[in-house]
Image: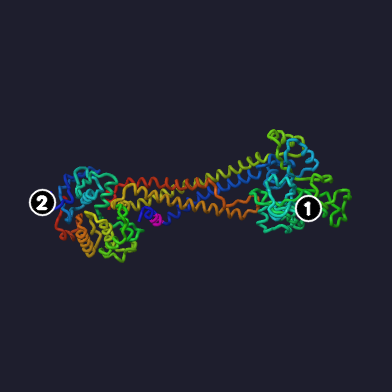
Amino acid sequence: MGLNLQVMIKIKDVEHSYASGQKISFSDLEIENGDQWLIIGGSGKGKTTLLHILGGILKPTFGNIEINETAINLLEGSALDKFRGKHIGIIFQQPHLIKNFSVLNNVLAAQYFAGLVQNKNEVLQVLDQLGLADKANAKPDELSQGQMQRVAIARAVINKPTIIIADEPTSALDDENTEVVLGLLQSLAKTNNATLLIATHDDRIKNKIAKHYILN
Amino acid sequence: MNLFKLSWFNLKANALSTALNILLLSFGIGVIAVLLLTGYQLEKKLTSNAKNIDAVVGAKGSPLQLILSSIYHIDFPTGNIPLEEVRGLLTNRAIKKAVPLALGDSYENFRIVGTDSSFLSLYELEIEQGTLFSNLFEVNIGANVAKIKGLKVGDKIKGSHGLTTDGDVHDEHDFTISGIYKATGSVADNLVLTSITTVWATHEEHDHSDDTDASDTSGTHKHEEEGHKHNHEEDVHSGEEEPFHENVHYLESKRENREITSLLIQYRGPAAIVSFPRFVNQQTIMQAASPAMESARLFSLIGVGLKSLQAFGILIVIISALSVFISLYNSLKDRKYDLAIIRTMGASKLKLFTLIILEGLFLSAIATFIGIAWAHIALEWVGSLQDAEQARLTGLIFIADEVKLIIGGIVVGVIAALLPAIQAYKTDISRILAKN
């Protein structure tokens, strides 16, 4: 787009109507490759809705979403699932790990469901980066909340997605863990050259990322 | 990591309800399997033992009892028939073969049958070791008798009077085993065969004690034998009768009032099917019973019981299918968030559908095989407790219907998983993930 760097995410004329009849319009936005943004807004302002639309989980009622020059609002069924698995890493407020699976298997599952080759060494390497090297064989219930959230991050980044989106990733964490998790997210996004989008109303992280997309 | 592993782990995660479902379904499958195996074995025993026999002629009474005692060697005989009557009947042109039976004695749980060589051709028996019984007090034994009792040619066995082991122990007589038959799979494997003359002789021998018990079914009580090596002080008979020094054929017996128990008849042609029984039943003091008719009647009686038990088994299977459905449905509610996350990782709707179906499949496959296994074990165990060698059940055979049962059991699991699987397929992941 002109003189800009490569545009990774493009939001254009996006509107969403809920079953209740309530309608939200999102202002247009273009995000460059490797950028880090916060999506800020109080509850009910559509943070989660926007993240779901960007993650290909929800189809907008109107408008276009392009990710890496693919109009994901036009993708259907398993093509969309596949695209999401390969290109988008998603982190939720709760880690929701598969409880009977070891940490290792939880992360391997992300490779499996994205249709990629399962590579144990790669997983162990990512776990190492997240300070979980010694927890590979632990079950989720043996981990602290912060550790579980780090496993969720490992799961989101293992497939080297082009964009990482996180929905309130720190709201369940204490100050110390918030700092650690945010730091890890930022540095992993950087090393993987991924675009990072974090939806939050957590004041603790507002000053850590400069670019804000505000919903009101 | 794959779908099999994931569904297996999900089952393990709900170990208690998984175990309950497996228990319930395997019980239902097991009950049906036991009934299939029992019905199959009973029917096979009923038909194979009667296959060469068109009619049984014996004393009047219950025709079913006559068939049971003379063909299957269970139940007691209806009584005896006089030899003169037999001689008269044997001139009947409808008869191709008539095999005489003299019943009433036993060796442990095995029945001693007095007969002649025609019995061997009727049951397609062949001598494996030794020779056919030819002298007095020589017997041949069936393959099972030899195997279970560990007997060989030349061994002596003690026969007792009466058909149960708790009969008169003092009425024992030594027999010498002269031959052992090859196994045929028929009731003959469980019999001790000897000549009719031997049966008569053993009774002559112990009848000297004035035992005139009327219930004695092979009764030759009123005859005593002075030619025998016993003290016969009280003998009432004179020596004009044949001595039991040699084993003459029963039809050559010159003594009066001789009796046998029954005749197994093969017809010369199909014309006799109607006329022969009518002739016997109306013109003689004997009766003729058809094994085909009586065993069909018997099996239809047992069949009613088997059918209603089978319905019970099917009911249990249906209940367990419902239980599988409820468990899967509930566990789906617990992990709908997990499943949504799996979707965000790139899994298609079809993968989630397959995942739930696999869980139902695993559960029902395990339960079905456990059910079939315990059915066989239970039946073999029941068989080992059975006294009557002739009707013994075994768990060591497999029948074609079990394949259908296995397929049916697995299909039940898949059907139970179908609705939850469709539910998983249709999940609106955005809505679930938004409801945090």
Q: Main secondary structure of the magenta part?
A: helix
Residue A44 visible, this orientation = no
- Of the residues shown, which amino acid type is indicated by label 2? Leu
Mark 1 and mark 2 on one chain: no
Report the side of A121 relative to A32 (left or right): right
Rendered location of residue A3, percent (x, y) = 10, 51
Q: Give the label on residue B135, or none.
A: 1
Q: Residues within 10 Å of mark 2 (few under 14, many from 20)?
A: few
Does A16 sit above or below residue B206? above
Marked residue chain, label 1: B
Which of the two residues, B38 or B183, is positioned nearer the viewer here?
A: B183
- Of the residues shown, which amino acid type is indicated by label 1? Asn
Tell whether position B84 is magenta.
Answer: no
Q: Residues within 10 Å of mark 1 (few under 14, many from 20)?
A: some
Marked residue chain, label 2: A
Q: Residue furthest left?
A: A3
Which region of the structure is painted magenta? B8-14
Which of the two residues, B286 or B148, is positioned nearer the viewer here?
A: B148
Rendered location of residue B143, percent (x, y) = 66, 53
Rendered location of residue B342, percent (x, y) = 31, 52
- Residue at the disc numbered 2: A3
